[in-house]
Amino acid sequence: MAAFRELGLAPWLVEQARQMGLSRPTPVQASCIPPILQGRDCLGCAKTGSGKTAAFVLPVLQVLSEDPYGIFCLVLTPTRELAYQIAEQFRVLGKPLGLKDCVVVGGLDMVAQALELSRKPHVVIATPGRLADHLRSSNTFSLKKLKFLVLDEADRLLEQGCADFTADLEVILEAVPARRQTLLFSATLTDTLNELKSLAMNRPFFWEAASEVRTVDELDQRYLLVPEAVKDAYLVHLIQTFQDEHEDWSIIIFTKTCKECQILNMMLRKFSFPSVALHSMMKQRQRFAALAKFKSSIFKILIATDVAARGLDIPTVQVVINHNTPGLPKIYIHRVGRTARAGRNGISITMVTQYDIHLVHAIEEEIKLKLQEFSVEEKLVLDILTHVNVTRRECEIELEYMDFDEKKEINKRKQMILEGKDPDLEEKRKAELAKIKKKNNKFREKVQQTLQEKNLSMGIAGSQFGQ
Ligand SMILES: Nc1ncnc2c1ncn2[C@@H]1O[C@H](COP(=O)(O)OP(=O)(O)OP(=O)(O)O)[C@@H](O)[C@H]1O
């Protein structure tokens, strides 16, 4: 494979990459950097941990160095933590340029961000919601001279789901110039390829790693068939085993909901495991602090919702445990991709109950690989079962006292305010709608009842006529 300098990168960038431990380009870098340097749009689809970030950071820095101005490049990404991670790569690789970057994400002070944006940073790394808020509310900065628009985890940004970015993306796309270079990257681009292609129309270059299997070879993928009621005992047993056998291993455990994440964290702490939680109901500063503790290996276990499923690059992670089987194969691919990165080995264990077997089949079909069973000595699990279940129940009760559900409600209201809605009005509107619905139902029932009575009396009358 070609060396970095053969891809058209300047010597200072090649040296900077080398200092970061990037001595030879990965396939996605070798394939995408030259067309980007030629001014083409690029859609890059490569497996998790294959170096997609540097595949866009390096050519953007190269072009920036030739004509530096702000705001030169906008990178959009679905999560706040990921935005900071990308900013760090820009900062380190772009150090010789004196690069100015600005991270614009939710949960942090908007005024400070607005001020930073007005100082024309070279690169802005943002989550769509917060950047759209800035565009709607201030005119202290302009994206009109932008040269590069990058969508990292591009398929997620275009997906319509619980965190729907499409309305915010519309605002952003209106604010950027039509003449720009658009770079789209993800490990799972293919489902949304057509939508993505409409964003990248400047002689787009599409690159996908030539591989049947959608996950990396270094990843040992297992499943563990467990009844729902004993899941946590299995989890505690697994963690204990990994900790006993490997001193320096870090583990990420993915859960379905914020509440489950919180409960598991409390429970593992009661068993003296060094764990931290990361989910969207935490304050942003707590989220950053939790991630920092995990990254520095002070805490070896991160329990997270899918907010951590994409993009996070933590080399020490050797194990990913899926406490629930992901409902979508795509989510599975990103979750297990938090380990076995950049050629390292890793193992993923997906807990599967009897109700999830069809989900495993869907995953296997998508990744083109069969998961292997992970064997556990059941007796050891049974030994701790009662203790684990009692501890979990204690945690559930503690959480009830902490008004977790109430906080969820408050967060919902905060979100409404951020979306420009009045939560009280919304509640009133909902209550009124429910009232109208109830009234309509009553009315319908009454009409039906009257019709039935009428039919009945006509029937009786008819039978009387017939007599
Ligand atoms: N050329 C290279 N040589 C060695 N290591 C590299 C190279 N390029 C990137 N890396 C390292 O590989 C790791 C993964 O890179 P990166 O986070 O960009 O992966 P990704 O493809 O974006 O993964 P994901 O799909 O999970 O977001 C990083 O730690 C990065 O420093």
Image: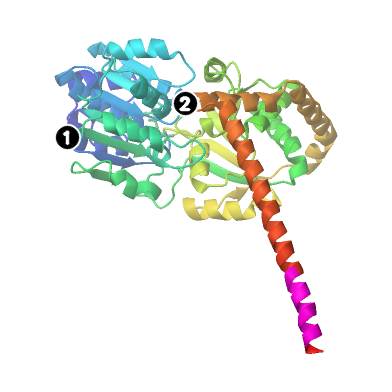
Rendered location of residue 405, percent (x, y): 69, 28
Check residue 420 in the rendering and tell me which mark sits there, or answer none: 2
Label tally = 2
The residue lying furthest to the bottom in this view is: 467
Q: Residue at x 18, y 34 (%)?
A: 179
Q: Is residue 353 located in the magenta-colored stretch of the structure?
A: no
The answer to whether mark 2 and mark 1 are in CB contact below 8 A is: no
Q: Is mark 1 within 8 Å of ligand 1?
A: no
Q: Quadrant of residue 204?
A: top left
- Give the residue type at disc 1: Gly
In primary-sequence order, the first of circles 2 and 1 is 1
Q: Which kind of residue does numbered mark 2 sit on?
A: Gly
The CA distance from mark 2 to mark 1 is 39 Å
**From this viewpoint, which residue is outermost toward the front?**
465
Q: Circle 2 — which element?
A: loop
Q: Nearer the viewer, residue 154 or 274?
A: 154
Q: Which mark is residue 39?
A: 1
Residue displayed at 34% across by 16% down:
102
In which image quadrant can residue 103 be found? top left
User: Can you tell me whether the CB of the residue at mark 2 lies under 8 Å from the nearest atom of ligand 1?
Assistant: no
Callout 2 environment at 10 Å: few (<14), some (14 to 19), or many (20+)?
few
- Residue 462 in sight in this render: yes
**Vertical position of residue 156 compared to residue 316: above or below:** below
Residue 173 in the image, given as x and y percentages of width and height: 29, 33
